[in-house]
Every structure is written in structure tokens, then in C-alpha cells.
Image (spheres, rainbow, N blue to C red):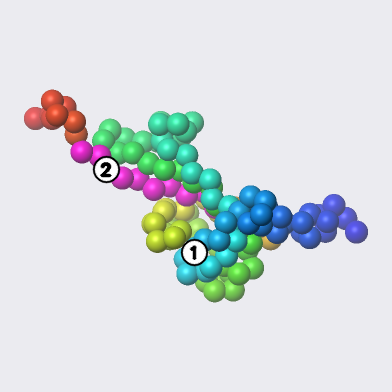
Amino acid sequence: MTFKDDLREDLATFVACDEFGEVLDVDGVICKAQLMTHSANKSARQTETYDKLNGDFSELYLMTAPYVAKHGKIPERGDWLFVNGKRYTVERSEDELGLLHIELSSYRATNPRRGDQRC
């Protein structure tokens, strides 16, 4: 047995609810997954935001097989993905030995503060 074979057997540990994961609805697939979210003002990707536009950048890990069984493919850059009803845009996705790793972004506009109005 190779290291990759051993790793495939242990992949479920990364999304197990008693370890790192939680039960999420990912595009209609109820599954164990790990979702990590970073706000734009705390992220190294802060330079990707625009004036009056804030965002959340997330990484999602879930088992590839259930997602592909329902949707027929892994999501691609630019696709929308819904996690527990919240819409994200897929920035990158990759199947890593049976564990789907998806980088997501979600932007929202903010209201200008009083006195911050521009003509």
C-alpha cells in the first residue's frame, strides 16, 4: 500500500464533525464539510477589494464523490456555489485525492458613512 492509498482512507477525518467539520448544505448536497472564512480586512487578499465593497474569502473542503454524483462535475472558476443558502463565487477548485478544495469569495456593498459622500 502506498502513502496516497493511506491518505485516501484518512480523508474523511478532515471533514468529520467530531474533528474539523460540520454538516453543511453545499449546492443541495447535505454533507460533512469544513468551511473557513476570512473577512477582507483580515485577509492577505485585501488588495482584491474595491472602495465601498467588502468581502469574505472562504475555503471549503468536502468529499468529492457526493458533490460530483449530484452535479456531474466539480465547480469551475466563476460558478456560483451556495453554502447554507449563502451565495459565493468560485475562485478556484481542485480535487485533491478525493477531497474537494474550493476557494470562494462573497462581496457585499457597504453604505457610505455620514460625511463620506462624494459628489
From what the image shows, is residue 25 above or below residue 115?
A: below
Residue 103 rendering spot, x and y as whole percentages = 52, 48
Label 1 sits on residue: 25
Q: Residue furthest left?
A: 119
Per the rendered image, the range of residues in magenta is 102-111
First in sequence: mark 1 or mark 2? 1
Discs 1/2, front: 1
Where's the C terminus, which quadrant? Answer: top left
**Image-based side of 76 in relation to 41, left or right:** right
Task: Bin the neighbour count of mark 2 within 10 Å (Cα to Cα): few under 14, some 14-19, many 20 and up.
Answer: few
| Residue drawn at point x = 49 percent, y = 31 percent | 44
103 drawn magenta: yes
From what the image shows, is residue 101 above or below residue 52?
A: below
**Mark number, residue 109:** 2
Q: Is residue 61 visible?
A: no
Marks counted in the figure total: 2
Q: Residue furthest right?
A: 1
Q: Residue furthest top?
A: 115
| Residue drawn at point x = 67 percent, y = 51 percent | 19
Quarter of the view holding residue 118 = top left
- How far is disc 1 from disc 2 in space, using C-alphas? 25 Å
